[in-house]
Amino acid sequence: MAVFLLVVAAAVGRAEEKESPFLLGFFGQYPFGQVNTAVVSPEDSYANFNPIDFGYGFGLSVEYRLAPSMRLFLGGSHSSFWVYEMTGYTTNQLHFNDDAFMYMDTTGFRLGAKLVLPGSGIQPWIGAGFGYYRWDAAYMTGDRSSTWGSDGGYAWGLTYLGGVDIRVFEVGGNGLWLTVYADLAAPAVFPVIENLFQAGWTWDNSGGNPIMGPYRVGAGFAMPI
């Protein structure tokens, strides 16, 4: 009996040794919410709060299992969203016939931690991260072949996450994990675009805009490395 227990303990120890504390993950996400834009109704207004028409985000991350209930992560990502503004717009201030879109493009990295509820196949978690990003805001045609003006810079700040990891299969003590999650909050910036649409007209976004969609949902997978 003692020999049997020793064999079982050794086998469990080898399985645990095979499970790498590092995970490499790939993810995609969809942003939504409302952002400030330049042109609105009534026609003599200068700012508006409009919903995002479409956007996307993607990236990769590396996680380290510090303890069964805690992981550290470092990730890089790129995201983009756009808002359809107008076409054939004519007021006493603006006169043009092209479609106009506001684009926001962001690239950066994020360092953070997750608190995990351990489980063999399903692991819910919450987390937060601090990120540093390059952002670019521009008013362009739909095919991005022409622009009326742009602004850009750097920003940093906190984001908050929550999701669940699901082990989809296991090989040699290591598993491939499917992740579904929500990603909330984003640093706010205040673009200023001079001579937007016509000489002398400046868009001063004093209300601020998130550099990513205010709300993001996503999915991805992670594998041991």
Image (cartoon, helix red, strand yellow):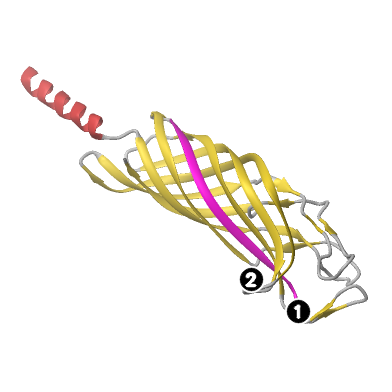
Q: Is disc 2 surrounded by few (<14), some (14 to 19) or many (20+) residues within 10 Å?
A: few
Q: Is disc 1 surrounded by few (<14), some (14 to 19) or many (20+) residues within 10 Å?
A: some
Residue sitting nearer the eye, 96 or 158 = 96
Residue 25 image position (x, y, % from top left)? 40, 46
Residue 106 lies in magenta, yes or no? no
Residue 42 vertical placement versus 59 (above, below): below
Residue 174 as seen in the image, left or right of residue 161: left
Residue 70 vertical placement versus 98 (above, below): above
Identify the residue position indicated by label 2 in the image. Answer: 144
Comparing marks 2 and 1, which lies closer to the viewer? 2
Residue 54 vertical placement versus 12 (above, below): below
**Which amino acid, mark 2?**
Arg
- The disc label shown at residue 87, or none: 1
Residue that appears at 24% across and 29% down: 17
Residue 34 image position (x, y, % from top left)? 71, 59
Residue sitting nearer the eye, 210 or 114 = 210
Residue that sits furthest to the right in the current view: 92
CA gap, disc 2 and disc 1: 15 Å
First in sequence: mark 2 or mark 1?
1
**Which amino acid, mark 1?**
Thr
Residue that appears at 73% across and 48% down: 189
Q: Which residues are magenta?
A: 70-86
